Amino acid sequence: MVGCETAEFLVENEEAVTSVTILEMLDRMAENVSPTYRPFFLARLRKEGVVMKTRTTVMGITDRGVKVMQDGEPGFIEGDAVVVAVGFRANPKNTEPFKGKAPEVYSIGDCVKARMIKEAIEEGFEVGRKI
């Protein structure tokens, strides 16, 4: 999902970007997106011209593009820039530096568990209501 969101941002906001290719190691693109939203999200990316390749592993990055292995076959995808978006990882220690320096510290979003922005917004709203 991180790569898909980044691709969407680039094609919608960066005039210098002429094409975007998303490389996904898994069998499905945006696997963790809600089933009711996923088809519309992927259709929007396709409409913007984003190329999506599944079952593709990045083997190396060169000054001309990306060496890949797709379905067991080596390949190369040319490009001027590479954005590495490797998913989510929770980091509960992000709040540690603030403990003892503020009267109260609340953890939300990826400090609790790696998820989508929607959950972080909901948690932030709930914490805001409580204080």
Image (cartoon, rainbow, N blue to C red):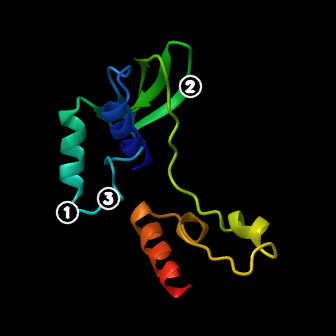
> Nearer the N terminus, badge 2 or badge 1?
1
Q: Is residue 100 visible?
A: yes
Q: Is residue 8 above or below residue 36?
A: above
Picture coordinates of residue 70, whole percent (x, y):
39, 31
Q: Which residue is mark 3?
A: 33
Q: Distance of mark 2 from mark 1, alpha carbons?
A: 35 Å
Secondary structure at badge 2 equals strand
Q: Amino acid at mark 3?
A: Val
Whether pointer 2 and pointer 1 mark residues with C-beta atoms closer than 8 Å, the reply is no
Q: Amino acid at mark 2?
A: Gly
- Crowding near pointer 2: few (<14 within 10 Å), some, many (20+)? few
Q: Which residue is mark 2?
A: 60
Q: Quadrant of residue 9?
A: top left
Q: Is residue 116 visible?
A: no
Q: Quadrant of the C terminus?
A: bottom right
> Quick one: 110 or 54, which is closer to the camera?
110
Whether pointer 1 and pointer 3 mark residues with C-beta atoms closer than 8 Å, the reply is no
| Residue 36: numbered disc | 1
Q: Is residue 27 left or right of residue 85?
A: left
Q: Is residue 29 above or below residue 107?
A: above
> Quick one: 80 or 117, which is closer to the camera?
117
| Residue 7: numbered disc | none
Q: Quadrant of residue 54?
A: top left
Q: Quadrant of residue 69?
A: top left
Picture coordinates of residue 53, whole percent (x, y):
33, 34
The residue positioned 61% from the left and 73% from the top of the image is 107
Whether pointer 2 and pointer 3 mark residues with C-beta atoms closer than 8 Å, the reply is no
- Crowding near pointer 1: few (<14 within 10 Å), some, many (20+)? few
Q: Amino acid at mark 1?
A: Thr
